Image (spheres, helix red, strand yellow):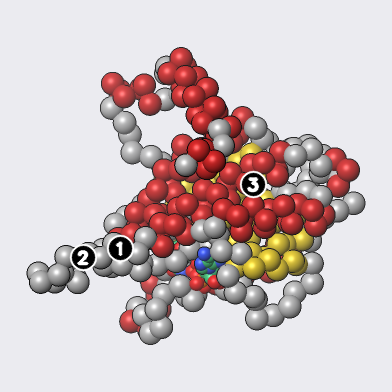
Amino acid sequence: MAPPVAIVTGASSGIGLALTHHLLARNWAVVMADLNAPKESLANTLFIQTDIASWAAQAALFAQAHAWHGRLDFFAANAGIDDRDDIFHSLDPTTPPKQPNMQTLEVNLMGTYYGIKLAAHYMTVPSAAAGKPRPGGKIVVTASAAGIYPLPSVPQYAASKHALVGLVRSLGPGAAAVDIRINALCPALVATGLAPPGLMANFDPAQVTPMSTMMAGFEALAGLEGVGGEGWVARGRSGEVVEGNLGELVWHEPPTRPEASSYMDEKGLEDWARTYRERNRNFAKEDWMKQM
Ligand SMILES: NC(=O)c1ccc[n+]([C@@H]2O[C@H](COP(=O)([O-])OP(=O)(O)OC[C@H]3O[C@@H](n4cnc5c(N)ncnc54)[C@H](O)[C@@H]3O)[C@@H](O)[C@H]2O)c1
């Protein structure tokens, strides 16, 4: 029987690499997707060089990953980058600005969306022949504490991570309806390759969150032990957001909305929700790229 299979993006460094080790120790087979090859060679892994900002690259990644053992159980949409543009600190009254570099949003938001779209497909392909008892799976998106609180040093990054929190909360119920659970992990400050060289040295070590809290977060959101049983997906949460800060997991609820806004609840106005679902299903089926 094939082992359960995970795809981890940004797997060659930091949180993604630690998660890869965590999964391997629990008998997963791990597809490591990254711009850069990992420095170490690890058994039961398949490295696929991928730029997640490219739809074509991610489509090829998922097809190859699924073909490896014939199943996909877990997707960690983890790759992310910090800001590549500035607005207010680089003003020059003599020269109008050039078109800004939006790579942070292209990678963190669009790249993550592409991955979720592909994971939903490959997780729901019937894979009983590979030993997967029923279609479905779990997705954890690595957002950030900067997806909950503002972070003035990196506004595009904060915008992208706030967007991921909203995306995960909004996708949660629809995912659960097709036996997929999607949740977001929001790391506080973790020592990885993300921050520019020298930055971490400015912080009090007491403010740095250990990698063990990140792994506890993935476990709380996806339960990576005992995979494959009938109830593995059914036991999971969906649409949840948890911050990993120092030794703690802090669960974040969405802000309380006014009573008058109950139209935002799918249950509140089922016709409204159904209309959007129908229309967007048709959009999703259109080959709009060909029409451009
Ligand atoms: N380290 C922190 O303090 C912190 C805090 C909050 C959130 N995060 C998030 O955690 C995630 C992992 O980051 P990390 O801290 O481990 O950083 P990291 O830089 O150590 O690892 C990120 C990995 O992603 C890869 N990557 C970057 N762009 C990519 C692309 N377009 N396609 C494929 N791979 C790409 C990099 O090559 C790298 O291996 C990111 O989403 C980051 O925003 C980190």
Mark 1 residue element: loop
How would you rate the neighbour count of disc 3 (Cα within 10 Å): few for under 14, some for 14-19, many for 20 or more? many
Look at 31% across and 31% down and name the residue there: 257
The image shows residue 88 at horizontal and vertical percentages of 18, 66
Looking at the rendered structure, which numbered label has been put on residue 119?
A: 3
State the image quarter where residue 64 is shown. Answer: bottom right
Residue at the top extreme of this rendering: 271
Look at 38% across and 72% down and name the residue there: 207
| In this view, 39 is above or below 1 | below
- In-image side of 89 versus 19 (left or right): left
The image shows residue 274 at horizontal and vertical percentages of 50, 19
Query: Label 2 is placed on what type of residue?
Result: Pro
Query: Label 3 is placed on what type of residue?
Result: Ala
- CB within 8 Å, label 3 to label 2: no
- In-image side of 49 versus 209 (left or right): right
Specify whether residue 95 is in view.
yes
Mark 3 residue element: helix
Earlier along the polypeptide chain: callout 3 or callout 1? 1
Earlier along the polypeptide chain: callout 3 or callout 2? 2
How would you rate the neighbour count of disc 2 (Cα within 10 Å): few for under 14, some for 14-19, many for 20 or more? few
The image shows residue 202 at horizontal and vertical percentages of 33, 82
Q: How many marks?
A: 3
Residue nearest the viewer, comparing 124 with 288: 288
Residue tagged by mark 2? 97
Looking at the rendered structure, which numbered label has been put on residue 100?
A: 1
